[in-house]
Image (cartoon, grey):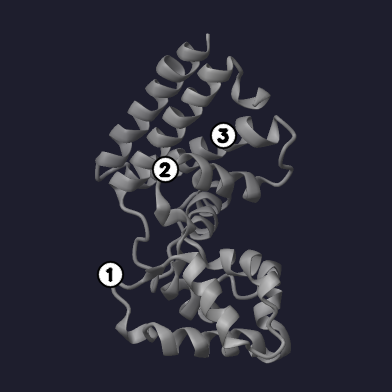
Amino acid sequence: MINEFFDKIWAEKVKSVGELIQSDKYRTEGLIILCCYIGSISYERYIMSNSITKDRDAYKKILLNYSGLDLYQNFDLLFFYIWPESEYNNHNSYNYFRRNNYENYRKIKQVIEKKFVPKKNINSQNRFIAEKEILNLIDTATINNVKINEMKDKLELFSVSEIFYRYYRCGGVHKGDILIDLNLFLTISIDQMLQTIRNILANLKEECVSNSKWPWEL
């Protein structure tokens, strides 16, 4: 039954969505469905098992734990730099960076720019930085009023997994479109998105079969 769940039911879904994404006419619709499918898998794995209660946390965790792609945990320099002008500037999750006229944000940005590159010099080769490297940089910089033990959760707001959830999943579910800021060129390629859901299902299936449990029983 578990094998059939993955090899027939989910495999057929992924095949169909792959055909949509590969077509020019229905690519956006295919991307929306793919994002919803990842949400469905994260719901089955984490929400139904009562191990996580928030959809956002479950979605990001399925990307980080099952996709097998390191890119989702990377810090996105471009998103960090343009965040004040993005639609998520006023989102409550980013209150820490908006506090006191963006004081914390400006201090951290100054340190990051000095170590890496300014916005105008960002390209596909230097845009993504390992989260650990950013944390170490902030730790050694000893920025006033910035506590390193608070930083991990805060910096995850600028991770690739966060962008995937906010711009792809939330855009598709709530507005029927993949919301990509004009300054945010495609973070994740079509091939990487298809690889993501295939890897998630393959890795989750392996865990389920080895434990003789459904995703919501793990």
- Pointer 1 and pointer 3: residues touching (CB < 8 Å)? no
Q: Name the N-terminal-most of marks 2 and 1.
A: 2
What's the residue at 58%, 89% (across, down)? Answer: 106
123 up-or-down from 114: above or below: above
Q: Decide: marks 3, 2 in contact (CB < 8 A)? A: no
The three-letter amino acid code for the residue at tag 1 is Gln
Residue identified by numbered label 1: 125
Q: Position of residue 56 (x, y in %)?
A: 63, 50
The residue that appears at 33% across and 86% down in the rendered structure is: 120
**Is residue 102 toward the left or the right of residue 122 in the image?**
right
- In terms of secondary structure, where does tag 1 sit? loop
Residue 4 at least partly seen: yes
State the SS at label 3: helix
Disc on res. 111: none
Relative to 35, residue 117 above or below: below
The residue tagged with tag 2: helix, strand or loop?
loop
**What type is the residue that disc 3 sits on?**
Ser
Which mark is drawn over residue 68? 2
Provide residue 214's location: percent of width, then percent of height. Answer: 60, 20
Residue 193 placement, left or right of 158: left
Residue behind mark 3: 40
Q: What is the number of callouts on the image? A: 3
Task: Give the amino acid at mark 2.
Answer: Gly
Q: Which residue is drawn at 46% across and 12% down?
A: 4
In space, the residues marked 2 and 1 are separated at their CA atoms by 20 Å
Name the N-terminal-most of marks 3 and 2: 3
